Image (cartoon, rainbow, N blue to C red):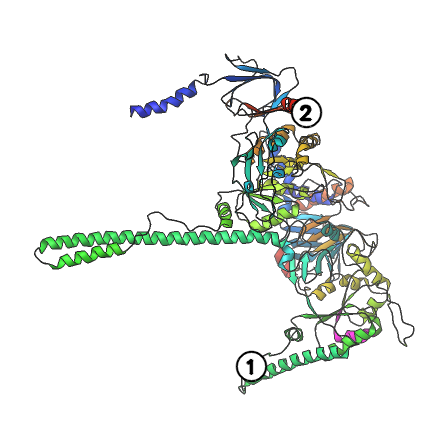
Amino acid sequence: MILSAFLLALPQEDAANPAAPRGRAEVWRLDRVETLDGDALENVTLIVREGAIEQIGQALIVPDGARVRDLRDSGMVASPPLVLTHANFLIQDQRGSGNASRWRAVDSLWLAEGWEKDLLREGVLLAGVDPPGSGLPGRTSVIEAGGGWPRPQALVNDLHLKLTMSASPAAKEVVRRALKEADEAIEKEKKAREEWEKARADWVNQQKEKEKEKAEKEQAEKQQSGEKKEGQGGKSARAQDEEEKPPPETFEPPAFPPDLQAVVEWVRQERLAQVWISSAADFVHWQDVLDERELPYELVLRHALSQNFHEIAEQLAQAKVRLDVPAIITFLPFTRIRANLPAELARAGVERLVLSPAGDSLRELRDFRGAVTRVVSEGLDRKRAFEAITLEPARALGQEGRIQALKAGAPANFVVWSGDPLDPMSRAMLVVKDGKVVYDREKEEEEEARR
Amino acid sequence: MSLLLHLIALAGAAAPLQDPPPAPEAEKQAEADKPAEAPKEEPKPAPAAESPWLAVVGGDVYTVTGGVVRGGTVLCKDERIVAVGSQVRVPEGARVVDARGMRVYPGLVAVNSSGLVRGSGAGARDGFDPFSLNLDLALTGGLTTVQGGDTIVKLTRGTLDGHLVGTGPWVDLNVSPTTSSGRRELAARFAKAREHLRARRDWRIATELGKAEGEEPKPEGVDEEALALLEGRSTARFQADGQKDLLAICDFLEEFPLQSVIFGGREAWTVAGRLGRTGTRFVLTARDKFWADDTLNRASGWSIENARILWEHGVEFAILPEQAGVSTGGIIGRDLMTLPLEAAFAIRGGLSQDAALRAITLDAAKVLGIEDKLGSLEPGKDADLIVCDGDLFHYRTFVQWTVVNGRIAYDKQKAPYFAHIRPRPEASAEEVLEAIRKAAQEQAGEPSEPAVEPAADDPEKQADGR
């Protein structure tokens, strides 16, 4: 009793005294930090200890023995790292268009040496990858840069169920069939469980009855002692007990086929579907496939330079799901009328907005911040845009714990840019992961010069 | 309260301003954006767009089957027309299309279109793009129902609901005048089917009279298509332009009377009387040229009067442009975007306006076998209609609104295509004030017109009573 009280008290004491020295502190002094937690801070001291931000603010006292990195008067700006939801230039594979949901994106990763640099150079720390192909090609994964080669540090191997939808009978049929099969499999499992429950209950009842019989017999024995019959009867009952195998104590569900497992989890609301659509019509057909069924999903909008999602902006907002949208200024179909889809969706009331590069290639990633800047200059709220390339995609990948607004208690994951992060001219100079510098542009350039 | 709202709604209807009023969703949004402290002066009425009622008021209504109603109202509920007339009460909150000074026609029907139906049967629904350019352009041309391949669809913009109308309109038959063996073979097929039908009929009569011997005759070796045609369960389609071919079809139809339709018919005017007696229908292209053969000792070639002559001999027909698609290519004025102009060419050849209108509405629906559902403005039919700013067959006329299944699928001033060409005139201040005054009078219990309707609350009842 006393011991347990002591154990409980320990962490409390620890939390009450955060200043307790636990490892060496690192102090960053910066001109400006885009914290994404309220307004940006100027003239900032950032104290990092054991991979987490201990304190952030102006005029903080530098702890004793801390290592100080003074980046003031350089125009550098720190911000949370960018998160890329679809780093599919890291994927190389060919797949068809049916239900192949047994596959995971990590199974198709194809990493060259230095793959991380491609991400880190753009200030990207976390990246989602998707299984290639259409229909139900598999499940998405999340990888983190700064973890090493040849294998990446995969944070999550098995995340969302990818699904592509289009205005075609074949595309709809793949999903409808998968849903039907999953429903049947669930029904089958339910039946098996009911059978087991019945068998178990019967068996338990039998046991009880037998014991009752036994007890009655024993009583009868006591009453009519001296007779020989009952000896035989007892023996046969015991033999019967041995013959009858009791049903297992816990229910063992029948295994689902490998391509149905993830679909079943989706139907049971245990997994999110990531639905890829490329036009307004696709969304209408997606709603048709859902047919009023409540299934968890998020939408990935992937369209060409001309798109017609404005037709359904309000419906998309009403769907109350996360939207992953390319950060490009588009044209209304068959016109030169410019459209800023992300801004339009934000206006329509879409709450969870993720901005992505216009395509899956590395080239698009390199143009990404410039593209975001254009979307902002043509109407999307700047803070909204910033969140849509950092915090919201982190949430989309289930990594809201890893990538947070820069405040005390958050993990020390941030990027130091040479200037305003949303200025395409500025570059990622340093990427800090759990308090450690995992990318240093100056060092890299020096090394390259030496070569 | 509701009095004032009604008044505002009426004023809004009377004054189509250049800037369209904000969509109700946007209004709601604006409402939500307002600071919560701001006391709301009045509770909002139910957003107008959610009303199941749609009233097209004040236009000259060309019903096709019931003449023209001057300054009439077409009242629709959900996807059906419930009332057409000059004294129809519009329910409160109804969506109102102000058609004053305009003409209201049934939605146009195109047979054998291309580029608008994607896939076949249920697949056409699953492959339908409810926002495609072709669809929009077809709606600007006033089309509401099209057939392509074996599938008939409605141009339901923005939704898959109600898209599919039907499948399998007809069976193709080939009666060639040059290969007698083919004709003999076809006739033999139908003769066998007819024999079977007769044997079955006799057996049934005998059974009823209690004199039947043996079992019901089985359709062994009998062509199922031929049976369906002879029993009137499906329609035969022929392809023929020349007189010889048309006469061969007449021969066949005289021997085996069937429901039928002939595509082409360029020389049909030369044998219109005989064609009329077979009861066949046509799908014509009024401007389809076909030069006369001066070596023949008979009338030949095409005629601008083809449609008129056929009409006078009791032949019903649908009119189709040379290119039955919707596209931004090709010859302008010869595709489905300008279907009425194709019919106008038949008018030039002497066809009456009424007949031309039928050829692109009700009679086209007859060719497709869906005339019980659409093709005219009558209570009970589908709420498919168009509002035009002039005579449908005038080159200057634009479709201002297209309504499909009771939903406004096209509004010229809102869609990007023709809004800038002769924009819809705005109402003057006097007109708006007059409308408000009139509405106030009505609300105060002084009907400005003679007693309109019995005080029935349910306009559907009124529609039934008509």
Which kind of residue does numbered mark 1 sit on?
Glu
Chain assignment, label 1: B
Pointer 2 chain: A
Q: Nearer the viewer, mark 1 or mark 2?
A: 2
- The front one of A88 and B38 is A88
- Give percent across and percent down for residue B349: 86, 64
Counting from the top left corner in percent of width and height, residue B457 is at: 60, 53
Label 1 environment density (alpha carbons within 10 Å; few <14, some 14–19, many ≥20): some
**Magenta segment, principal secondary structure?**
helix
Rendered location of residue B425, percent (x, y)? 79, 44
**Residue B277, magenta (yes or no):** yes
| SS state under label 1 | loop
Does the CB distance between marks 1 and 2 fall below 8 Å?
no
User: Which residue is at the front of the view, B441 or B319?
Assistant: B319
Q: Give me the disc on residue A18.
A: none
* Residue A247 image offset from top left, x and y in percent: 32, 52
Picture quadrant where residue A319 is located: top right
SS at mark 2 in the image: loop
Give the alpha-carbon distance from disc 1 to disc 2, as whole Å. Answer: 90 Å
* Amino acid type, residue under disc 2 in the picture: Ser
Vertical placement of residue B426 versus B258, above or below:
above
Q: Which residue is mark 2?
A: A426
Q: Quadrant of the N terminus of chain A?
A: top left
Query: Which segment did they paint magenta?
Result: B271-281
> Which residue is label 1 attached to?
B216
